[in-house]
Amino acid sequence: MASRTQIVCLCEGEKGGGSGKHTSIDQVFISRLMKSLQPDWLRPRGGSNVVRLVPCGGRKTLIEKMPGELRTCLNKGADTTLMVWADCDDDCADGDALKDKFWQEAQQAGIGQTDFDRVVFIFAKDRLENWIQFLNTGKTDEAEEGPRLRHSKKAAEAARKLAKLCKAGRSVEDMPPSLRWSCKGWRSLVQRMKKS
């Protein structure tokens, strides 16, 4: 890990978007959101790699990889935050159920509750496309998968809108359930960092 990295984002998908040559929609969304948020607790460093995306393939691999990445971040001290981006899919009713899967893996790897609680989990229901649809149109139904995007422009626009809502401290109660759950996790991190 580069010593200047301050946020490490583990996510599903392959590097470069898998079989295609372009970066996946998820990676575009995550990267743009982090750059647009620019949390005030990040220290500006000229030329630094503030955010590092780590595509992990499928969710099973992502769960297995998380404890090792968390240890690496913890070894960096308070300078590095681990975020985990994943989809709940059909086998997890909500973010709490998926978080439990990560906790089970963490325990087997010898990670304690205090260290595990430092991870920021961002979980979409099925795909980030539902969030993108909501952010760009004002509505979505997470019972159905959002429409696939062929171009990254809509994903980047949605990420910028979400960052703007976060910075304004807008209520999340009218958001899709998985986005609401994830936003509360992010806000909890921001409050914690402001106090430290």
Image (cartoon, rainbow, N blue to C red):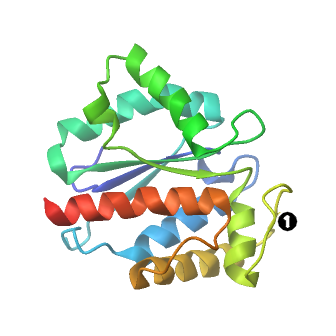
The residue wearing badge 1 is 147
State which quadrant residue 187 falls in.
Answer: bottom left
**Left or right of 80 in this view: 19:** right
Q: Residue at x 31, y 29 (%)?
A: 113
- Say whether residue 127 is visible: yes
- Is 97 on the left-hand or right-hand side of 102? right
Above or below 104: residue 136:
below
Q: Is residue 164 above or below residue 12?
A: below
Q: Is residue 82 above or below residue 195?
A: above
Q: Quadrant of the N terminus?
A: top left
**Viewer-proximal residue among 21 and 90:** 90
State which quadrant residue 116 falls in.
top left
Nearest the eye: 69 or 180: 180
**Residue 54, image x and y in percent?**
48, 46
Residue 90 is situated, as x and y percent measured from the top left of the image, at 78, 38
- Give residue 178's quadrant in the image: bottom right
Q: Residue at x 58, y 29 (%)?
A: 61
Q: Secondary structure at mark 1?
A: loop
Q: Position of residue 190 (x, y in %)?
A: 30, 64
Pinpoint residue 139: horizontal percent, then vertical percent: 77, 76
Up/down of 34 relative to 139, above or below: above
Residue 49 appearing in the image? no
How many labels sit on residues? Answer: 1
Say what amino acid the circle numbered 1 marks.
Pro
Is 151 placed left or right of 144 in the picture?
A: left
